[in-house]
Image (cartoon, rainbow, N blue to C red):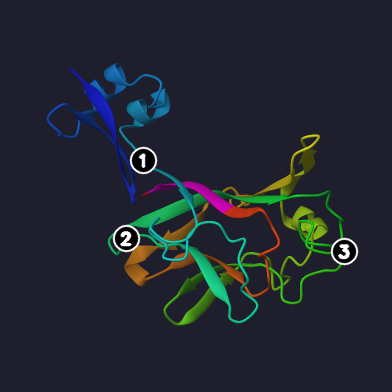
Amino acid sequence: MVTYWSQSKTGVAVKDSAGGDLDLATRYLDSKNVLMYEELKSGIIQAPVLRFLDTVGDGSGTKDAAVDHSGAAEEYMLVPEADEAMRLYSLRVYIRDATTFNSNGYGAISSSPLTNGVQVLVKDGTGTLLDLLHEEPVKCNAHWLRVGDADPGEAFGAGSTILTVTVPLARSGVPIRVNGFDSEYLAVVLNDDFSALTEHYFWVEGFIE
């Protein structure tokens, strides 16, 4: 039997050569490196969420946030389908720039903090439901260490400097829940000029309930 991955904006499924979903036992036998034994034992298979945030929220929008957002706020989003809910474990921030970083600047944009800063929110159609930074936007490189586990910067000799930060979304033991039934979504809100950065991405990991 031939198995393959089927990737969609809602996650990844394991299918047979005819395109049908494989049953639990077959999934495990044919995809030992994919499915955890505990999932088999419990009878629960959870589709992973492994996505860059983007300006549309379904994977089809702009993902690189190294853009001038000073004129108007822009949201980089993860939007569940209307009939699904997502549990999110972590948000990974990736900042790449041409020179070394100052702790008081953002990337290597300048040695001064941003004016408005980066917000990380759970929202719905009515506004903000949860501010994951407790109303303290990230305005400089050092601020990311207040909420996440950071690599202080990878320098590649003649190449760029890269800062990566993993912001845990399950420190309480329960992953953040974003419910598409109620039009909820995860948003990183930017309202400063990030165009001097080489690259600026936000990567989220979790699963679909």
Q: Position of residue 50 (x, y in %)?
A: 46, 44
**Discs 1/2, front:** 2
Relative height, residue 118 to residue 174 (above, below)? below
Q: Is residue 12 left or right of residue 64?
A: left
The residue under label 3 is: 111
Residues under labels 1 and 3: Cα distance?
Answer: 44 Å
Q: Position of residue 192 (x, y in %)?
A: 68, 73
Q: Position of residue 102 (x, y in %)?
A: 87, 56
Q: Are circles 3 and 2 on residues that touch, CB within 8 Å?
A: no
Query: Nearer the N terminus, badge 3 or badge 2?
Result: 2
Q: Secondary structure at mark 2?
A: loop
Q: Quadrant of residue 69?
A: bottom right
The residue under label 2 is: 81
Amino acid carrying label 2: it is: Glu
Residue at 28 percent of width and 18 percent of height: 30
Relative height, residue 19 to residue 182 (above, below)? above
Residues under labels 1 and 2: Cα distance?
Answer: 15 Å
Amino acid carrying label 1: it is: Gln
The residue under label 1 is: 46
